[in-house]
Image (spheres, rainbow, N blue to C red):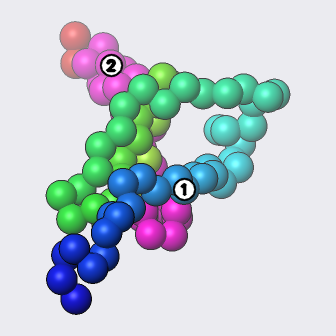
């Protein structure tokens, strides 16, 4: 089909992303603010960063959490290693 046949194009997609509950995320009704988002050029992946230093990689189509990194933990381990080298 021609592009004009497909109008109006969808301009937004709303997906609820839920983080699997772990001991690290079990805080009494704690709402963590997402501070940044970016989407891969092909639109397949989304990366979010929250105020607690957790970066998460999501699959956009399914809303599935693929991987997460706690950067505050990485930074604190790095600081401990620096202290040991002094």
Task: Answer whether residue 76 is magenta in the image.
Answer: yes
Query: In x, y percent, where is residue 23?
Result: 71, 42
Query: In x, y percent, where is residue 35?
Result: 42, 26
Which of 64 and 24 lies nearest the eye of the viewer?
64
Please identify the quarter of the rendering in which residue 60 is found.
bottom left
Count numbered badges in the picture: 2
**Outermost residue, right direction?**
28
Please identify the quarter of the rendering in which residue 41 is found.
bottom left
Q: Quadrant of the N terminus?
A: bottom left
**Outermost residue, top direction?**
86
Q: Quadrant of the C terminus?
A: top left
Residue drawn at (67%, 38%), measured in percent from left and top?
25
Which of 82 and 23 lies nearest the eye of the viewer?
23
Residue drawn at (69%, 48%), measured in percent from left and top?
22
- Which class describes the residues within 10 Å of circle 1: few (<14), some (14-19), or many (20+)? few
Left or right side of 85 for 9:
right
Q: Are marks 1 and 2 in contact (CB under 8 Å)?
A: no
Task: Answer whether residue 69 is magenta in the image.
Answer: yes
The disc label shown at residue 45, or none: none
Element on which disc 1 rests: loop
The residue indicated by pointer 2 is 79
Q: CA distance from mark 1 to mark 2?
A: 37 Å
Is 29 placed above or below 58 here? above
Q: Earlier in the sequence, mark 1 or mark 2?
A: 1
Element on which disc 2 rests: helix
Query: In x, y percent, where is residue 15?
Result: 54, 56
Left or right side of 30 for 83:
left
The residue indicated by pointer 1 is 15
Query: In x, y percent, where is residue 78?
Result: 31, 26
Highlighted magenta segment, given as a residue range: 59-83
The answer to whether residue 57 shows anywhere in this view is no
């Amino acid at each position: 089909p021609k592009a004009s046949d497909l109008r109006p194009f969808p301009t937004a997609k709303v997906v609820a992303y839920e983080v699997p509950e772990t001991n690290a995320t079990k805080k009494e009704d704690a709402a963590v603010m997402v501070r940044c988002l970016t989407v891969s050029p092909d639109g397949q992946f989304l990366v979010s960063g929250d105020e607690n230093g957790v970066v998460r990689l999501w699959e956009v189509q399914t809303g599935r959490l693929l991987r997460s990194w706690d950067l505050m933990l990485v930074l604190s381990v790095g600081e401990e290693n620096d202290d040991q080298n002094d």
